[in-house]
Amino acid sequence: MKDDISSAVDDFLSTDKGKKLAARRPELERLARGEDGRRLFAMLDMETMKKAAQGGDIRTLSALISSALKTEEGARIAQQIKDMTK
């Protein structure tokens, strides 16, 4: 059974940018399950994100993600993912 982290990684890997990182899935999973990842997921309202994604509510998704990326944990994770694409 998939948990929220695995589902989030799957969702990301299905995007155009995510497809470039598909071969690095184990690294993404470790990043998501690491201390910063766990803290970031704890900050996110996954139910609201899921509903927004299913309903195509880009404005809500964007606001939630933007808010998360402004945290120290979010910024570090974003940088690590960016570094993986180099």
Image: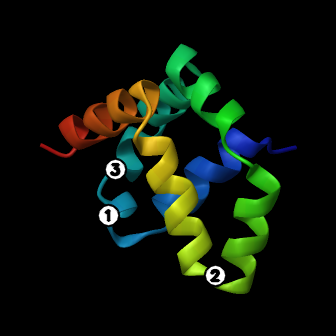
Q: Is residue 13 above or below residue 58?
A: above
Query: Which residue is at the far top?
Result: 35
Element type where label 2 sits in the image: loop
The reply to whether the C-beta atoms of the residues labelled 1 and 3 are less than 8 Å apart is: yes
Numbered disc in front, either 1 or 3: 1
Mark identifier at residue 57:
2
Q: Earlier in the sequence, mark 2 or mark 3?
A: 3
Return the residue at label 1.
17
How many numbered discs? 3
Return the residue at label 3.
21
Numbered disc in front, either 1 or 2: 2
The quarter of the rendered structure image containing the C terminus is top left
68 or 85, nearer to the observer: 68
At 29% from the left and 31% from the top, the residue drawn is: 80
Image quadrant where residue 42 sits: top right
- How far apart marks 1 and 2 lie (CA) works out to 20 Å
How packed mark 1 is, by other alpha carbons closer than 10 Å (few <14, some 14-19, many 20 or more), is: few
Query: Which residue is at the far bottom?
Result: 56
